Amino acid sequence: MGNGNVEEVAETVPNRKPESTMDCPKELRPTSVLHIGKYYPPHTGGIETHLKYLVSHQSPLMPVEVVVANDGIGTRTEILDGANITRIPTFGTIASQPLCPTLPWNLAGRSEAIVHLHVPNPWAAQSYLLSGHKGKLIVTHHADTLGRRHLRKLTDPFVRSAMKRAAAIIVTSKRYLESSEELGAFQEKCHVIPLGIDGEAFRAEVSDAVSRIHAKYGSRLILAVGRLVAYKGFEYLLEAMQGIDATLLLIGTGPMDGHLQSIVEKLGIGNKVHMLGYVQDLVPYYRAALMLVLPSVSRAESFGMVQLEAMAAGIPVVNTDIECGVPEVSVHGVTGITVPPKDAGALAGAIKTLLENPELHAKYGRTGMLRANEEFSARRMAERTFDVYLSVL
């Protein structure tokens, strides 16, 4: 089974750092790559951010095409991050799946050497199969499709067919790979490649913005970032805040907004919990906060990219011990504290530990920044992905 840690290839020269395989001769590179995803930025989301980072690092090396859903029934083409982005007509959504009936025809007749499919995205998997595209198929399996039992009776067969067709499957953590039913039959062609980010962006100088945040909310800040959905477990964090002498800034939108607001009111913690909704620039909030809390309760949270952003900004993370990559990213006792899911008392205890132990807090922050830089950079992720491309060609 591949593990994504493919050795870099370079001439052996004393005191010379090996070059990246992305710097290999042009004639050895893939001639082109086509990414198929749900959406592309400015749409927000972990998969969208991941796709943007990949495209940004690949487009200087080879032609890159991206096909994703549009917001409406028209087709829109543009050049972003050095790639041709095609947003195809969308006629609503079902179970978070954009309905793009023209996708198979959009993929047919193309000749890219590599087709990189980002799932869960059942209709995209079916569309690739229907299109007859001859490029080598790479699948990045961001998460299992959970729930929706009746709908999956229709979609699971062609998702499995795409997995069988794939030359390689990329998964973002070893723990998720080992616990995934969907990947169980395909482990021999799986490669573990963690997600990556541009850490420099989270170390930018934003002192004026940080000062404004502190002036408005105080300096003893706890941050939580994510869609307001059930698997994020934010209700347990709200319960934990009852005994915390600090202020929580909860950033995100989603269907549980009203429910979480009612919990704040019921618990009487409106004086120290602020739900900020959508925030375009998160960097000042990471830099202003003392820690990030990710209280997710199920493996629907497959990786938790916000942890990387917090670590890159130099703050520790409180996360939960769920069967996915979350506790592999921020490691208990190294870059933060990991607690059992659905345990408000344990969350409160971890938060208090970091608030009351400045030396431990600083240590986790420094280690997290180093770990984000060395293990989870966008460039390293792109290099590992490029290695997979080379291996299948």
Image (spheres, rainbow, N blue to C red):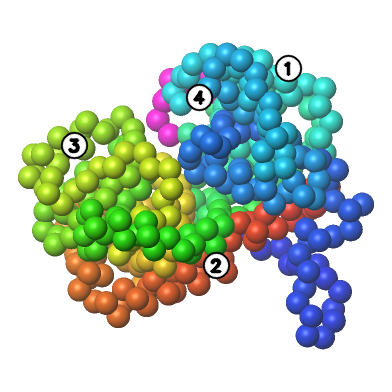
Q: Are marks 1 and 3 in contact (CB under 8 Å)?
A: no
**Camera-nearest residue between 384 and 170:** 384
Task: Name the residue located 72 percent from the left edge and 42 percent from the top edge.
Answer: 82
Residue at mark 4: 97
Circle number at residue 214: none
Q: Is residue 4 magenta?
A: no
Amino acid type of the residue that numbered disc 3 sits on in the rendered structure: Gln
Q: Secondary structure at mark 1?
A: helix
Circle number at residue 105: 1
Magenta residues, start to end: 146-155
Please name the predominant secondary structure of the magenta segment in the image: helix
Disc on the earlier residue, 1 or 4: 4
Disc on the earlier residue, 4 or 2: 4
Nearest to the eye among marks 3 and 4: give it. Answer: 3
Q: Secondary structure at mark 3?
A: helix
Residue at mark 2: 373
Q: Position of residue 39 (x, y in %)?
A: 56, 32
Residue at mark 3: 261
Amino acid type of the residue that numbered disc 4 sits on in the rendered structure: Gln
Q: Secondary structure at mark 2?
A: helix
Q: Position of residue 117 (x, y in %)?
A: 65, 36
Amino acid type of the residue that numbered disc 1 sits on in the rendered structure: Trp
Task: Name the residue located 54 percent from the left edge and 44 percent from the top edge.
Answer: 49
Task: Name the residue located 46 percent from the left edge and 19 percent from the top edge.
Answer: 94
Disc on the earlier residue, 2 or 1: 1
Nearest to the eye among marks 1 and 3: give it. Answer: 3
**Camera-nearest residue between 2 and 141:** 141
Q: Is residue 148 magenta?
A: yes
Task: List the single residue furthest toward the bottom.
Answer: 14
User: Where is residue 102, by image quadrant?
Assistant: top right
Disc on the earlier residue, 1 or 3: 1
